[in-house]
Amino acid sequence: MTKYVVGNWKCNKGQEEAQEWFSEFADLYRPVEGLDVIVAPSFLCLQALSQYVQALQLKNVFLAAQDVSPFPRGSYTGAVAADMLKAMVDYVIIGHSERRRYFHETSQDTTNKMAEAVDAGLKPIVCIDQPYAMSQLTALNDIDCDEMILAYGPVEATSARVPEQPQRVAEAARFISQVQSKRPVVYGGSLFPDNVGDYVSLPELSGIFVGESSLEAKSFVAICNKVGDSLKA
């Protein structure tokens, strides 16, 4: 079973900083069979980074977009359509709680974004949290994509900077898997190299989703190594 480490840079790093990060990451990173590493930089540097990362030839390392338009190309000022991204990334994050909180996105927006992403050949990383989990999961029923990843990220864990207890994460992951079977579930919420081991070991999870810890290449590699070690055990 493939395991995943997803790093979401959010609104951080310009092009030069991003290339410096990947240069340092390339020196430290050691690929492990069965581990896929996904990094989501800002839109600002995706095009340059896609070429830079390709030149580095990092095995099992992929780029993701942090968002995508719910509409195709057209008269949508400020939007970035899915088919404009497909040459630069393999994955796209959809439905993050910060998009709902700060940008007032609805469940219908999320559904439309998933449809656009899949039609363009992108793999969605769909964010799930309480109390919206059931509506979020039900919306996936009409999306035909075998390579979708479900990212469970309780809002409280992010805002309070305290991770949800592993037992509760396992319970949530089991619930998600009951509704959407055969889709990998990853957990995100205040994870760092010193606490990620408690979550990596959960059999209900297929990996982790990190924000702040992905901003420093060294800490992100440390997390990748812990997930990689779990595959060797």
Image: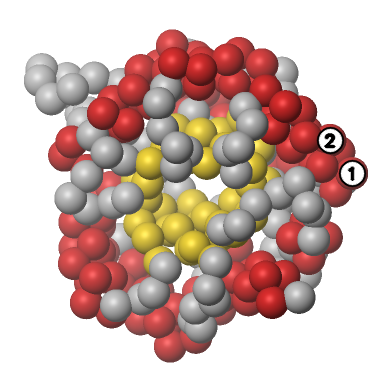
In the figure, 48 relative to 170: above or below?
below
Residue 9 percent coordinates (x, y): 46, 54
Give the side of residue 49 with respect to residue 175, left or right.
left
Q: Using the image, tell me which numbered label, if any, was put on residue 171.
A: 2
In the figure, 72 relative to 38: above or below?
above
Q: Quadrant of the N terminus?
A: bottom right
Q: Quadrant of the C terminus?
A: bottom right
Callouts 1 and 2 close, C-beta under 8 Å: yes
Quickly name the residue at label 1.
167
| Residue 175 visible in the current orientation | yes
State the residue in front, 29 or 33.
33
What separation in Å lies between label 1 and label 2 (alpha carbons)? 6 Å
> Where on the picture, by quarter, is residue 223?
bottom right
Q: Amino acid at mark 1?
A: Gln
Residue at image coords 60%, 44%: 184
Which class describes the residues within 10 Å of circle 2: few (<14), some (14-19), or many (20+)? few
> Where on the picture, by quarter, is residue 220?
bottom right
